[in-house]
Image (cartoon, rainbow, N blue to C red):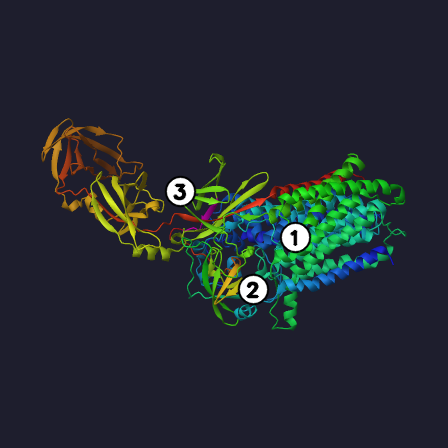
Amino acid sequence: MKKLSVVLIAMIGVAIWLFATAADDMSTYSTFTDATMSGKKVKVVGQLSKDKEMYYNPAEDPNYFSFYVKDKDGDEKKVVLLAEKPRDFELSEQIVITGKMQGEEFVASDMLMKCPSKYKDEEIYIKGAQG
Amino acid sequence: MDSIQYIGEHLLPGQIGQLAALFAFISSALAAIAYYFATQRAGTREEDNWLFIGRSAFVAHGLGIFLVIGVIFYIMLNQYYEYQYVQAHVSSDLPLRYIFSAFWEGQEGSFLIWMFWHIVLGMILMLTAKNWEAPTLSVLALVQAILGSMILGLYVTEELRVGSSPLLLLRETMDAPIFRNADYLSLIKGNGLTPALQNYWMTIHPPTLFLGFASTVVPFCFAIAGLWTKQHKAWLKPALRWSLFSAGILGTGILMGGAWAYEALNFGGYWAWDPVENASLVPWLILLAGIHSNLIANATGHSVRTSYIFYILTFLFVLYSTFLTRSGVLGETSVHAFTEMGLETQLIILMSTFFLLGFGLFAIRNKSIPSPVKEEATPSREFWMFIGTLVLLFSSVLITGSTSLPIYNKIRQVFDPVFEGIVIDDANVHYNKYQLWIAVFISMLSGVAQYLRYREVNFGGYARKFATHIGISLAITAVLTYLLSLWINLHSWQYVVLLATCLFTIIANLDYFITFAKGNKKAVGAALSHIGFGVMIIGVLASSLNKTVISSDPFAMQGLFDNVNSEDKDFLKKNIVLLKNNKTFMDKYEVTYESDDTDKHIRTFNLDFKLRDEAGKVVENFMLNPNILYNKDFTKIDYTNPSTKHYLTKDIFTHVSSLSKEEIDPEFAKTVEDSLKYTPFDVEIGQIFALYDTIKLSNLDTAVVRTYQAEVLEVSKQGATHPDYVVQEGDLSVGAKVKVSFEDSVYYANPILVLRGQYLYSFPDKVNALTTKIKIDEAIFDRLFAPEEELEYQTFQVKQGETFQFQGHALNFTGFDKQPTHPAYDKEEGDIAVSAVLNIDGKYQAKPLYLIRGNRPFNLKDEVADLGLHLRFASIDPKTESMEIMVAKQTNIDRRVPLAITTDSPRSDYIVLQAIEFQGINLFWLGSVVMLLGLFFSMWQRRLEKY
């Protein structure tokens, strides 16, 4: 057998093995119940509860922003994000938060928001009185 | 609806553009066919005819596309909002310099810029490729035909549409009630360019990246041409210079994206393994594999097959990344992705066509591709270089696999609708874990292989020299690794290995260049690129492992969250509050938020950074100016821009992550305002009065009362200004300048009050440091402006020089002012205006104004506030040369200034800041640039090689 074939086969083997182990880096989105059960750092996907309080007062703590999220099971929990309140937060349709449960609160270190895209925007801007 | 005759639409440019797109499409198809026959009939008489048709058709195609682009620029520049593309990307307030950015912001525009580069490259091929012109341009014209179909916007049937035209009218793309109005155009305005994209990066990054993408087509064309004409060796040389060019440009485009992210975005980094970033990195990696394979093939005749495969794959991955970013399949996983345009099917057709063309042809020709019978020798350069190309391919496969996860999810969902889809938890952790080893292998191979020789037949005689050089390089590597480990925080052994291999490749390539290649020009490019690669990776290590968030408060973590490990960097708090004019310590820096300036919609914060030595002397002092961009009506922040201090060895990166709650939350500001208790004051100008501020001491039930001294310095009756006040014609504005002092500090507040029509607008001012807020009470208007109906005027007929008496005042009419000015008078053409100059009691002067505008007389009064006198210049009698002056005296004048003051207004003059120190980031930039220079240098070397 040629040397290069050996190298190639070895590489394919390693690739398969890596793809198999890479599954550990991936997961489906969790729910708050999963987060409470596992106690580990997880990703939760849900909707922002727009009627509930969103609290951010940098004068008190610039790294504390709290809000409520309803996960895909409809379970609603208070979420504490250890960062500033992102811009356009109220517009978000879907939120993915990374963190873990601490008692009744979900403490998040990271958050991704999905906002209605500018490109999808079907409304036309109507000129205001001042053009 | 069809019957509506719309007003003001410009339909002609759109029709011209759509025709041009169709023309370009047809001519590219014709060019592909003509060049096909020119290739097939090469050497016959027909060849020249076919070549002529092919060339003309390709040039015609180019003109067609240029015309489409021209038309789009024309309608954009003229702001014809009846076109959807114009309405979506342009607005009347968009600066002209961003017109290009607006053009390629959208999908169709970026397709066009891609095609534009293809045409430019095609023209160069036409002029330089000689024998290769016909087959390569045949392939390129086919690519253009398929890309061109994407912008056709032709309806084959009601539902089936081919392409999405950039020249559709707004009313064709949506059904809205507004289009029932024939004059709808006068009602709409453009969306404009997202503020985030209004910077010079958006002007240079996309065209460079698209040139990079577009140029990968040339090696692909050569590969297909080689297979097609069975000239399996001859294509390699001309292809190489093009692939070096392409790798250089694509690399530059990717690096620019990183620089943009680092300089102008606020995630604080240059690379995030975002799917769109990966999608441009993968073709580049495969292209590099192709270049190395090509070099082997040129030198030894091995690896011709892999050269074919790599170049075909490079182009296919460019198409695949186009598909990923444009089909909307990435959806929520990327910040860059476009949303759907309904072109998924066409994009899949595009990919499959060239996949079949490339690999189909390869399969047919496979047997005829030559390769040396003898295997590569193990100690030969080609053997290890080949392994290197496989490592690059391996890296691409891994990245593509992970990036394609959304596609995997989609496919699985077809069969299993309840499958929710999986996501990568932490992209950085995931990708870095694997790519670290790729970098280790690449740097090791690029070091060792340089010492080896092509077609090694006598390694035995060479082994001594080889071992000596490797040995010395390794020894130097060990020493340098140790030294650098003192600086870079290598917290796990993998990083030590990576650092060592990178240093090894730098040293080995230097050694190779000096002792083996002896300055041979041909070796410069390779040595530069490999050294650059090593330096770049060391820069990555330093900047990410030594990255410190200097704005985080080290004590903030304590006791707040029980089971959060303080080592857990994710939970590190990154923000700090900076009060205006208060020193704050960040790491070793003393930071003061000194001031902020607002220019149009941009508010810039001036932050002073000081570094002191042990004796307290300032050894370094610099300003950073992060800014924020407000939306049009100042109701919210649209965007923030970071500001970075660059040192040779590190960068200090800052960005404003939030303003005070009062400024970002108007409702909260109102609640705070409503809860404040204002004390009314009526004070004379110059009278000093006291303000009392009760300050609660923390944790104690006691409070201290501080006394501030206040004084109204002056009151202005017009032209008052305030940062939040936008002047409108007809406004009546009154302002006061109030001085407030406490101990040694003196502050000034300038509250104003504006009367606009029937409404009063109060613009209070704050002395934040003393939590004091001052408003002017509306009673000031009655005091400053006596109502006209309460005044009893007495009329006097006077001549110039005469003096008359009025209620104890002596008024002398001294003369006229023919160039009169008056606060309420705006000069207009055709006015006849004159004012009477009156001297009162020898101390005061009044200049009431008389005006004839459009045959009608007017007069504007003047006042002597100190005396309460109001004077009007009512008329001129030319016969008697006497003037009619009206005078009234206001009784019971109250000159006190009514104010409302609170000392409990919370401070809102602060910003929330994030500051990060990146060490060694310049090594990253330097290394990357050197690596790319190496590629360009190699290309330049080969530009004139004969083939």
Under tag 3, what secondary structure? loop
Q: Residue at x 52, y 72 (%)?
A: A73
Image coordinates for residue B887, horizontal then vertical, percent: 14, 37
Q: Residue B566's x, y, as percent?
A: 54, 56
Measuring from the top left, give residue B841's x and y in whole percent: 14, 30
Q: Quadrant of the C terminus of chain B?
A: top right
Q: Vertical placement of B855 versus B15: above or below? A: above
Chain of the residue where label 3 is placed in the rendered structure = B
Closer to the camera, B99 or A22? A22
Disc 1 vs disc 2: Cβ atoms closer than 8 Å? no
Counting the numbered discs, the total is: 3
**B301 shown above or below A77:** above
Q: Chain of mark 2?
A: A
Magenta-drawn segment? B626-633
Kindly report the distance in space between the C-alpha atoms of the residues bearing marks 3 and 1: 42 Å
Tags 2 and 3 on a common chain = no
Q: Residues within 10 Å of mark 2 (few under 14, many from 20)?
A: many
Q: Which mark is residue B492?
A: 1
Number of other residues with Cα within 10 Å of mark 1, as a class: few under 14, some 14 to 19, many 20 or more = few
Magenta segment: does it hold B628? yes
Determine which residue is flagged by label 3. B581
Compared to residue A67, the image places residue B727 above or below, namely: above
